[in-house]
Amino acid sequence: MTLSLALEARDLSQLPSRRDEDWRWTDLRGLIRELPAPSPEVTAEISPGPFGDEGEAELLVVNGRVRGDAGLLTLAEGEARVVRLRFVSATAATGHGVKLAVSLAPGAQLTLLESYEGLAPDYLADAALGVRLETGARLERIVLAGDHAEGVSVSTASVSLAPGADFAQTVLTDGARRQRLETRVEHPGQSAAVRMDGAYLVADRRHADLTTAVNHAGTDGTTDQLVKGVVADQGRGVFQGRITVSPGADRTDARMGHHALLLSDRAEVNAKPELLIFADDVACAHGNTVGALDEDALFYAQQRGIPEAEARAMLTEAFIGEVIDRIVHEGAREVARAWAAHRRVG
Amino acid sequence: MLSIKNLHARVEAAEILKGLSLELPAGEVHAIMGPNGAGKSTLSYVLTGRQGYEVTDGTATLDGEDLLSLEANERAARGVFLSFQYPLEIPGVPAMTFLRTAMNAQRKARGEPEVSATEFLKRAREVAGQLKMDFDMLKRPLNVGFSGGEKKRMEIFQMAMLSPRLLILDETDSGLDIDALKIVADGVNALRSPDRAMLVITHYQRLLDYIRPDKVHVLAAGRIAATGGPELAHELEREGYDKYARAA
């Protein structure tokens, strides 16, 4: 049951619904009553995306159609580059899906500046990335999801790593009418390293779902995850994080943290952190907190002369800042910082 | 400068201040001493405008202007500064950033131009030097991982930078060893001036050996139970608060 299947087969019954455990908080079946027409081809020029001209190459995907050379996402041994990958939904009340492969040969290094851009309302968009990292390859993926408030969008990355590969990602989103950003990682252990961070800043009636699953299949692997969210108004944030340590995957080191701030009585966060451990000799930890902004800190800032609204913004920005500080690519980090300052919620 | 008349205040259902009156002229330092639960911290929060502290009667004015109708940040912009008993940690916000934001917010509220980065930095270096603070501490997130003494020193640093008119020190000596206490007291004494007033809230007389008050008030059961000179602090140290608590 996926959005992409439903779009391909033009069959509503293929949509995931709340009856699917993994989709219980991001119900598409109940939301979408009718499948929209397939998105048309768009040839008009698209203005620059959120990453501007960071990096040296751009791959644009408009309404599910790739413009340019998808080979940018295939790196030969030892090759290195920074690529902007932009998924643009340009036409109202239409639907589209796309599948892309990202492939890094041994020792290759890719920084992927991935954006989701909703230029019109009421679209259904699906994007699927198949990612393969060979030995010693490094991928830093920074996702900035800027869907339309009335868009519905699902992005799924399926990542498989060779021993010694390094996969790091940071997903930043302010949600959509309904939106899910999902990452699944097959982790071989053996010194492969995974960092999977995220931040959601959700206001109005938007919905953001960050779902991740990592399966540690071999010994000596690490996973480090920090996800933070701020939800205001009637917004809804969903975090589902699952780390599985398979039998025999000894000396796995896995850490998961999810922390959210609720800024209104009607804001909602649904969190499901799961550590499934089937090996003995492991170091695993998780922390999950959902609370309000620290009123003591707020008063402290006000007592120093900072007006309440500014103090709230400063504290929430600082809260999210911990995630942004972990982005390695400097240009992307600055874009992310500006995004967090601009997307102040509450 | 500060004039409090018949102040009544409550926190949730409990009335904590029950008709407190106090005159604090410019240039003077007054100590407020009292047993635990007398309302010392409540007084500092009521004066600085913390939410949840409801004034039910009475007035508090700063140079004739009603303080109680102002927001906390507006009071700060008019020169009211509270040195917290337990300074808050603000993760993710460097001390310098925090303080410069505060300073510029205050200036903006007073219709003054913003302080430039160079000007601010120069002044920060000077003040940090006077307080024997490691300048690098100011680049770290405010108070995060600081010791009790460092946090109090950071309060005094902020106080010196913001240059307030009414200084309220809430249990500034708590958690300080004697060396830190001297440095903090020196920092406070350096701020004494004819156009400033200070309210020093303390449970123990010790701090008053270093910050010498002009007057000492005993706060018991929500009102000023006695007022005297510095000798009153010594008497309290010897005899305790019992007789005031009983009288109330």
Image: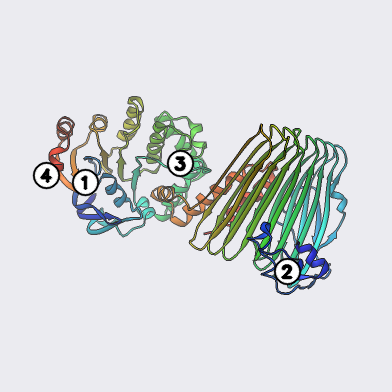
Q: Quick check: do tags 3 and 1 share a chain? A: yes
Residue occupied by mark 3: B89
Q: Quick check: do tags 4 and 1 share a chain? A: yes
Q: Give the letter of the chain under mark 3.
A: B
Residue type at the position of mark 4 = Ala
Q: Is label 3 in a helix, a strand or a loop?
A: loop
Neighbor class of circle 3 (other Cα within 10 Å; few <14, some 14-19, many 20+) is some
Residue A89, image quadrant: bottom right
Residue occupied by mark 4: B247
Q: Is label 1 in a helix, a strand or a loop?
A: strand
Up-down relation of residue A28 to residue B99 (above or below): below
* Residue A96 in view: no
x and y, in percent, of residue B181 in the image? 33, 29
Up-down relation of residue A33 to residue B166 (above or below): below
Residue type at the position of mark 3 = Glu
Q: CA distance from mark 4 to mark 2?
A: 75 Å
Residue type at the position of mark 2 = Tyr
The residue closer to the viewer here, B212 or A3, is A3
x and y, in percent, of residue B136 in the image? 51, 32
Q: CA distance from mark 3 to mark 1?
A: 31 Å
Q: Is label 4 in a helix, a strand or a loop?
A: helix
Q: CA distance from mark 4 to mark 3?
A: 39 Å
Asked whether the beta carbons under mark 2 and mark 3 sit within 8 Å of each other, the answer is no
Asked whether the beta carbons under mark 4 and mark 2 sit within 8 Å of each other, the answer is no
The residue closer to the viewer here, B36 or A189, is A189
Q: Give the letter of the chain under mark 2.
A: A
Residue occupied by mark 1: B24
The furthest residue to the top: B179
